[in-house]
Image (cartoon, grey):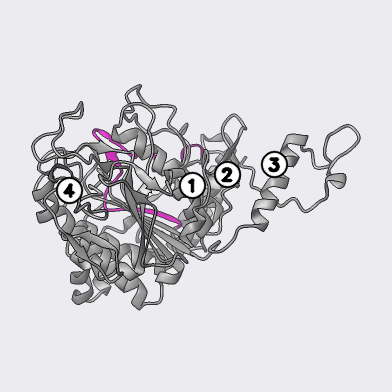
Amino acid sequence: MLSVQTSAGLTRRELLTVGGVSLLGLSLPEMLRHEARAQTSANRGTGFGRAQSLIFLYLQGSPSHIDTWDPKPDAPAEYRGEFSPIATTVPGMLLSEVLPRLSRQAHRFTLIRSLGVKPRGLTNHGAAIYMLMTGYDPSNFTPTGLSVPPSREDLPSAGSLVARFRPVERGALGYIALCGPVREGSVAGVGQGAGILGGAYDPFPMYDDPTRELPLQSLSLPADVTLGRLQARIDLRGRLAPTSRLGPADFDGYYGRAYSLIESARAANAFRLAGESSTVREQYGLTKFGQSCLLARRLIERGSRFVQVNWPSGSDTEPVAGPDGSWDTHRNNFPMLRDWRCPVFDRSLSALLEDLATRGLLETTLVVAVGEFGRSPRIGAPTTNNVGPGGRDHWPACYTCLLAGGGIPGGRVYGASDRHGAYPERNPVHPYDLLSTLYHALGIDSGTEYRDRLQRPRRLVEHGGVVTGLY
């Protein structure tokens, strides 16, 4: 069973008995935790619950922050790189020349330029991904921080927790993953599933190429099955659930969700991109990532809560030419960003922000774009991670995140990196602070707890708090 946070509306005298045990069956430490959470809830501050939905653009492989969002024109050439900075619609905010469209949208987003973390193990992708996705240090990775296949023993991803604590209306998809799975090497699904929460809170995956017609068999009934017949089957399975591998909670979650999705055409209609004009589709770019961003907009219009758009190429993948190649630029960083990665990303995200704003959705939709870390400040420096000519290595110590909408004002920069983009210089932000802020924006108190398989209370994030300075 999961234990959900409750408000401590009773006085301490009412809660305690002579023997030190509360009337509600709580120990003194548990009672004090409830009190502390109630005080936190009373001081949630500006921005709590302003976002009704979240679009999480996960740039797996990790773009170079210096060559995109945090240019260093005054640094030596071996740090600043080949690109020049350009002005934006916000005075004083500079972006790299490879993001011209986003430069015209700068008044709509805020940049955190002081995000940083030290992952457990070596600075490989897997551990950093797990931390970003779950809000916890990994405990089941190899000693070098490499990924292991996901399991039901994992802690849940942010999307799964949002699906659990901010459920959607019947007929809507709560947590969807688009474009491709989170992948490091041969391991897919790192930190993206519901783990110990159970399969009912796993993401609905749609990894087919959205530049083509998407298969929707899973959201419709076979020709010879009616809704009444399906309901009869579900009722029968429900009576048998106690003797099956599925517990009653899992059963209700799986089949209740499936029935509501089939009963309503809302979710299926969201995936029918043919309903969009060719002009709109071209604005997003006729690429996997671009059309997935358009799908994200269509899904949140139809009541989805958390839509995760994963960059189509996994982490730890050799960067190659083409619109779907990797951000993991250990070599050839500059031609890959200039010719392929940034034009696709720049077009897609700028179209998404403009589209949401035009439709009046940006105020209640939080858009987040981030990788698992940044890239090394010094170009081509020999390291254990096989950096080649013109490449940048993994760099978790400092990187940038973009946030737009959902009550967070645009046109600002929060925090700063040092002159080389190597370490936070002002207002450092941990990834767990970022996740706490996302929960806060969606109206989920970051002090909320659930129970793991050993019945231990788990917070949504291991540590950290809301970045109130963003508001």
Tell me which label, 1 or 2, sits earlier in the chain.
Answer: 1
Question: Of the residues shown, which amino acid type is indicated by label 3?
Answer: Arg
Outermost residue, right direction?
A: 18
- Residue ID for mark 2: 249
Tell me which label, 3 or 4, sits earlier in the chain.
Answer: 3
Q: Is residue 418 visible?
A: yes
Confirm or deny contact between disc 2 and disc 4 (CB under 8 A): no
Tell me which label, 3 or 1, sits earlier in the chain.
Answer: 3
Residue 334 vertical placement versus 127 (above, below):
below
- Residue ID for mark 4: 80
Residue 192 lies in magenta, yes or no? yes
- Mark 2–mark 4 distance (CA, rounded to whole Å): 54 Å
Quarter of the figure with residue 391: top left
- Mark 3–mark 1 distance (CA, rounded to whole Å): 29 Å
- Residue ID for mark 1: 200
Confirm or deny contact between disc 1 and disc 2 (CB under 8 A): yes
Q: Secondary structure at mark 2?
A: helix
Residue 269 lies in magenta, yes or no? no
